[in-house]
Image (tube, grey):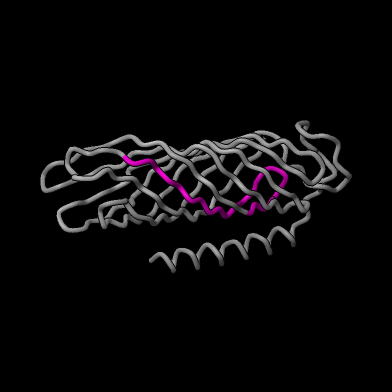
């Protein structure tokens, strides 16, 4: 399932890029007021935005033999500043997750997680290539027989992505994140457990 989802994201990104290149955006009109003056005909990435995403995550829980994976989806929002071809911003997201797995008597799942990240990238007109990183947080749930225990965990995330302007207000992106949530001590397990995982996702944003 993981490979099928990755392949679907690749195909979707190719389609998005082809559509963006074929479109006539009229970038010289209605430029948003959140950026320094841009050359006529240049796409503007500046300003606030909100959006949604869907993706797939896979990883492992330390000291357990458990490798949770599954679909996730959620919302994001942020703000970009632009100076010439350089774009800087902040973004926060919150995800519901179906990642889970069982090994022997232990089962672990990740009902939700979120991130608060900085972004920095290079814009080639309506195509933005960027790196991102910052704070991660989430919930990790352990189950043994009929007993369960949930722990809130914090950590960090790093990643990269590509975003394409479809119109002056709508964009689409593909993004990879590596997330590491710190170890927690569970009453149900003999050793501390942390959750490290990768996320590959597609998203759309509306720029104001």
Coordinates of residue 145 in the picture (x, y in percent): 11, 48
For the stretch drawn in magenta, what is the main secondary structure? strand
Q: Indicate whether residue 51 is drawn in magenta.
A: no
- Point out residue 102 in the picture as x, y percentages from the top left corner: 22, 56
Q: Nearer the viewer, residue 176 or 35?
A: 176
Residue farthest toward the right in the current orientation of the protein: 40
Q: Residue furthest top?
A: 33
Residue at the far left: name it: 146
Q: State which quadrant residue 96 falls in.
A: top left
The N terminus appears in which quarter of the rendering? bottom left
Point out residue 157 in the picture as x, y percentages from the top left corner: 50, 44
For residue 174, side relative to residue 106 (left or right): right
Quarter of the image with the C terminus in it: top right
* Above or below 199: residue 206: above
> In this picture, is 107 found above or below 30?
below
The question of residue 171 being in magenta is answered with: yes
Q: Is residue 166 visible?
A: no
Name the residue rendered at 56%, 43% in the picture. 133
Count the numbered circles shown. Answer: 0
For the question of whether residue 140 can be seen, the reply is: yes
- Give coordinates of residue 183: x percent, y percent: 33, 41
Asked whether, in this view, residue 90 is left or right of residue 121, the answer is left
Q: Quadrant of residue 142?
A: top left
Nearest to the observer: residue 157 or residue 93: 157
Q: Residue at x 32, y 55 (%)?
A: 68
Residue at 56% of width from left, 63% of height from top? 12
- Residue found 74% across the figure and 57% down from its top: 23
Q: Which residues are magenta?
A: 162-183
């Amino acid at each position: 399932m993981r490979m099928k989802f990755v392949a679907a994201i690749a195909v979707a990104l190719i389609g998005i890029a082809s559509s963006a290149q074929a479109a006539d955006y009229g970038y010289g009109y209605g430029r948003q007021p959140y950026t320094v003056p841009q050359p006529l005909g240049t796409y503007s990435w500046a300003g606030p935005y909100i959006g949604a995403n869907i993706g797939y995550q896979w990883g492992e829980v330390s000291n357990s033999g458990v490798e949770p994976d599954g679909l996730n989806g959620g919302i994001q929002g942020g703000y970009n500043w632009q100076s010439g071809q350089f774009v800087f911003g902040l973004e926060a997201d919150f995800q519901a997750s179906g990642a889970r797995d069982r090994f022997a008597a232990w089962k672990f799942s990740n009902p939700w997680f979120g991130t608060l990240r900085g972004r920095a990238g290079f814009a080639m007109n309506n195509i933005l290539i960027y790196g991102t990183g910052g704070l991660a947080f989430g919930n990790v749930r352990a189950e043994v027989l009929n007993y369960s225990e949930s722990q809130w965990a914090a950590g960090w995330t790093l990643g990269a992505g590509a975003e394409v302007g479809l119109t002056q207000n709508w964009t689409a992106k593909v993004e990879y994140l590596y997330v590491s949530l710190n170890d927690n001590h569970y009453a149900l397990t003999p050793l501390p457990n942390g959750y490290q995982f990768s996320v590959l996702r597609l998203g759309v944003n509306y720029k104001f």
